Image (spheres, rainbow, N blue to C red):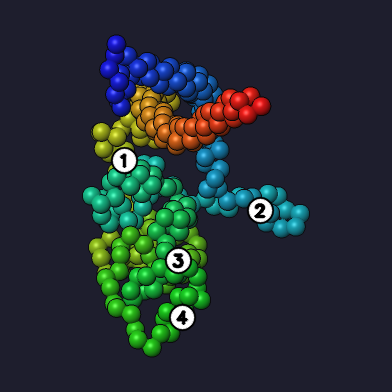
Amino acid sequence: MASRGSGISPPNESFLSRKKKEIVDRSMAIFEQSLERCLNNSVSTPRRTKRQRDDEDTTPEHRTSETGPRTKRKRAAPEPNGLRLACPFYKHDPAKYKNHNTCSGHCWKTVHRLKEHIYRNHVLKNCCPRCLEHFDGSEALKDHQRAKVPCELKQASVDTITDEQEKKLHTRAKPNVPEEEKWREMYQIIFPGEEVPSPYHELAAEPSKAGISRFSSPDEVKELLRTKLPPLVRRALEKEVDRLFEDLQEKVNQKTVEIIRDVELQMLRTIQFGEEQSVAPAAA
């Protein structure tokens, strides 16, 4: 007979591993079918996609007069060589932000779009500019700032911008200003007094990242996604399945305690009822 132990026997471990693999394999089959459909649809109409992207930064048509012909506003000159703008925080400290994908892994065509990224990821609302403590609302912050004893002055974090800097960034830029110049002005607001680097993302210039550059051909992108995505998705699925099984084991352990208690009570009632039945004829 196999010895009883608290652990799972090797045959059971092998069975569990097979079941996990079956779950992952079924999910991967669904993913690969979806990926193939997506790639075929996106690569089959590249011109339409590019035109739609270009339209995002075009200015709506307007009339020169009430009944005059339609004319288009003069479009701002594109950035040299199709380069895109980088997050100023990433440019300020590439080593620190190289693993922050929202900053290092993205680039923008206009400063307007880039500022949306900054407002989402680098603004800390209701924060005291002296002690950097965060408050639940503006009133709580005002009460803190009106305190008789001032708070301790701490070194400001370079990961976020202050309310004053945010107000300056919201100031409307002058018309016909090149995007590069807008970026430099924005950088000087966020990092005053520091040397301004190139505003452009180096993604296209790095050989290690050339495969995911926006300058790759559609066929190269398609092949890259086919080879790189499935292993990444499989690893993520395997981790998720392991986590779900661990959660299941914990829930079963908790349920086991309840089941044991219920069975014990049921057995005690059965034994008590049997004793009462055996005592009743004797009394008669």
Q: What amino acid type should be assigned to the residue bearing mark 1?
A: Leu
Q: Which of marks 4 and 1 is nearer the N terminus?
A: 4
Of discs 4 and 2, which sits in the foreground? 4
In screen coordinates, is 18 left or right of 171?
A: left
Dividing the image into 4 quarters, which one contains the N terminus?
top left
Q: What amino acid type should be assigned to the residue bearing mark 2?
A: His
Q: How crowded is mark 3: few (under 14 residues within 10 Å), some or many (20 or more)?
A: some
Disc number placed over residue 62 in the picture, else none: 2
Of discs 1 and 2, which sits in the foreground? 1
Q: For the residues marked 3 and 1, what is the alpha-carbon distance in whole angstroms?
A: 31 Å
Q: What amino acid type should be assigned to the residue bearing mark 4?
A: Asp
State the image quarter where residue 18 is shown: top left
Q: What amino acid type should be assigned to the residue bearing mark 3?
A: Lys
Q: Which of marks 1 and 2 is nearer the N terminus?
A: 2
Disc number placed over residue 150 in the picture, else none: none
Q: Name the residue under label 4.
A: 143
Say what secondary structure mark 3 lies in: loop
Q: Residue at x 35, y 70 (%)?
A: 132
